[in-house]
Amino acid sequence: MATILETAAGAGVFTTLLAAVDAAGLRGALEGAGPFTVFAPVDDAFAALPPGTVQTLVDNPPQLARILKYHVLAGAYTREALVAQAEWPSLEGAPIPIRRSEPFEVKNATVVTADIACDNGIVHVIDRVILPG
């Protein structure tokens, strides 16, 4: 089974996310044993941010790392497990609210594909970049 990052690379729709993971210096952590639950924004989610936002974040690795860690939970959680409680603590530290009814949402993003099993965790594909606070 592929790791989270190998799965993302193979999907072809996470180019920006993978570049951001590298720019923030998080590749080694996300290639680790985990397990992790990752809410993975597709390329279109990054493209929808205001112009210049992605470049500004790449130029500020600590802030970029903080935002990316907000997309990750320690542990492997399926959709069924996630909707069992209203919020979950992100690796960044701030809680991620979970919509417990349809549609399945995390913070302000809709989960387009849930429960992609990987060697070191689970990926849930989301349609927006989520921000702490």
Image: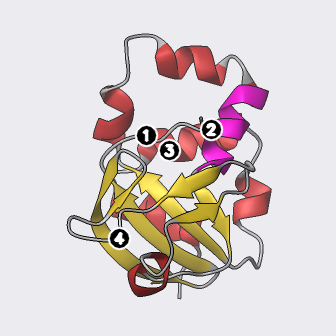
Residue type at tag 3? Leu
| Residue pointed to by mark 1 | 129
Q: Residue at x 33, y 28 (%)?
A: 47
User: Which mark is nearer the camera, 3 or 2?
Assistant: 2
User: Which mark is nearer the camera, 1 or 4?
Assistant: 4
| Residue pointed to by mark 4 | 100
Tell whether 55 sits left or right of 22.
Answer: left
Disc 2 and disc 1 in contact, CB within 8 angstroms: yes
Mark 1–mark 4 distance (CA, rounded to whole Å): 19 Å
Q: Viewer-proximal residue, 33 or 75?
A: 75
Residue type at tag 4? Arg
- Please state the extent of the stretch shown in magenta in the rendering: 62-70
Q: Viewer-proximal residue, 15 or 57?
A: 57
Mark 2 crowd level (few <14, some 14–19, many ≥20, 10 Å Cα) = some
Label whose residue precedes the other's in the sequence (3 or 2): 3
Label whose residue precedes the other's in the sequence (2 or 1): 2
